[in-house]
Amino acid sequence: MFLDRLLNQGSMPVLEQMLQFTDARQSLLAENVANVSTPGYVQKDLSLDQFQEILQKKVEEQESAAPGGVSFDDVSMDIQQPQRSILFHDGNNRSMEQLMSDQAKNALMHNMAVELLRDQYSMIETALREGK
Amino acid sequence: MFDVLDMGASALTAQRIRMDTIAGNIANANTLRDSDGKPNPYRRRFVVFAPGEAEGSTKPGVHVKSVQLDQSPLPKRFDPGNPDADKSGYVSYPNVDLAVEFVNALEASRAYEANVTMMDTAKSMFNSSLRLLA
């Protein structure tokens, strides 16, 4: 498919994956904040480093493949339970500061990906309008 | 995708129930009799949170599992003139500690704010995603 190939080359699939990642991570962070006073609740997270590693491998594959030849749809990750902060007596390892800074970073990353994707789309639109 | 908002709403509800409980404790900090008018000092109530949007639900979130009575001993004060005093002249008062209640209230209100922030962030993320279409 021509359109498929058009929308599946360059940075577009990468940005799409970034959007999906930040959406999923936002859900987990919100769940953590919701359960900030729940006894025995263990914080959940998706590792940004691991995600970027997977993405980097995909991008390297893509560089040596035909345009649109590498599918990014199979990028998936497991939910982790990182032990970053101290465990309170109620069995909860909350860290409000960590959560708030993570969600701010996550939202910025999401908005950055959206803006870049918009640029890509508008470039395609310009080409479709023959530069008019 | 809109699960985040439901999750936030469940947390807001839970924290508000917690705040209601605290308000009830403070209001009854000096209540010596039960609703039938019999001598029975008020016992402090507290909420127990559990993960999940509701009991048995698989949706993420938080809910109030139960409201329990604090079974710690009631403090006694010597007041022989009080009609509720026991034989040795001591009156049992509710086991509500105002300092503890205020600290809990502060924690509940901060947690409420944090959840509002998460919902705001999620909303702004949805909005920016929607702008991809326009």
Image (cartoon, coloured by chain):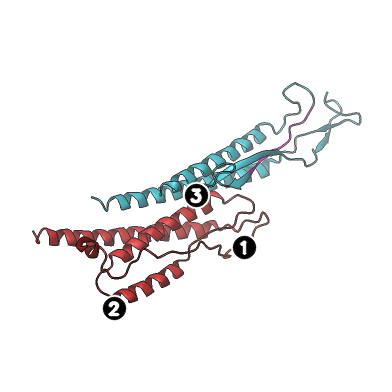
Chain colours: A red, B cyan
Q: Which residue is mark 3?
A: B114
Callout 3 and callout 1 share a chain = no
Badge number at residue A64: 2
Nearer the observer: mark 1 or 2; the answer is 2
Q: Position of residue B23 (x, y in %)?
A: 62, 35
Specify whether residue A113 is painted magenta: no
Name the residue at 40% across, 65% down: A75
Decide which of B31, B16 is in the foreground and name it: B16
Nearer the observer: mark 2 or 3; the answer is 2
Image quadrant where residue B27 sits: top right
Decide which of A27, A59 is in the foreground and name it: A59
Q: Is residue B103 left or right of residue B83?
A: left
- What amino acid does circle 1 point to? Ile
Q: Chain of mark 2?
A: A
- What amino acid does circle 2 point to? Ser
Q: Which residue is mark 1?
A: A86
